[in-house]
Image (cartoon, rainbow, N blue to C red):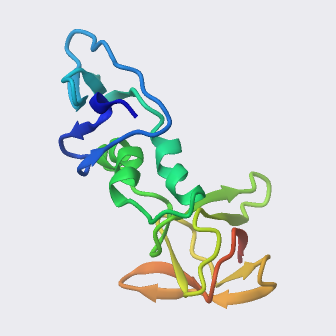
Amino acid sequence: PPADILITAKAPFAGTLTPAVGREVLEPAAGAEVMATFAHGRAAITKNKFGKGAAWLVGFYAGLEYANDIMQNKDYDAAKRAFVAAPVLDAGVQPVVDADVPLVESVLLRNKKSGKLAAVLINWKFHVEEPVTFIFRGVTPFQKARSLALDQSFPVQDKDGKICVTLPRLDEGDILLLE
């Protein structure tokens, strides 16, 4: 990468980042706040307020930067994940389903007709031999979770008032049917 590609950001981002995939130097609109700059001082991330919300523009492929290291079997970099998640977390949004292991993410699906829930689990690390606990926020209470990959049901636990399900391990992915 060129020497001037190093990105330095202010809160809510964590640390610095040297993109490996690519970049685009931004030209901030009037009123936009520059949240991160490249080493030459030009904008890498901007934030512009609109009504009660905000629009963020990122001049590099934050998601690919996060996934790139993992796909090359490099260590997890929390700062790279922060570049992906910071705008949403800054708005006060929390994931509906969260995992206690880095690189494990989930999407909650609801069947419109039956109301039944399923959590699609994605493991960017591809294999975790340790237990993984999933925390559910703002969902209809359920009694058990059936793992399709493990072909087994797991009980729901209450941890500090949160609905949790723990799997003994997680390969590339799984689907939990919430019953």
Q: Is residue 6 left or right of residue 104?
A: left
Point 72% across, 70% down: residue = 174
Q: Position of residue 15 (x, y in %)?
A: 23, 50
Q: Position of residue 142 (x, y in %)?
A: 62, 78
Tell me: residue 40, above or below residue 84.
Answer: above
28 or 158, nearer to the observer: 28
Q: Is residue 156 left or right of residue 15?
A: right
Can residue 48 be seen here?
Answer: no
- Looking at the rendered image, the quarter that the N terminus falls into is top left
- Looking at the rendered image, the quarter that the C terminus falls into is bottom right
Point 50% across, 60% down: residue = 96
Q: Is residue 18 left or right of residue 174?
A: left
Numbered label tally: 0
Q: Is residue 172 left or right of residue 11?
A: right
Q: Position of residue 163 (x, y in %)?
A: 49, 78
Tell me: residue 19, above or below residue 109.
Answer: above
Q: Position of residue 11 (x, y in %)?
A: 19, 45
Tell me: residue 101, above or below residue 113.
Answer: below
Tell me: residue 131, above or below residue 171.
Answer: below
108 or 20, nearer to the observer: 20
Point 62% across, 59% down: residue = 108
* Residue positioned most to the top: 30
Can residue 107 be seen here?
Answer: yes
9 or 150, nearer to the observer: 9
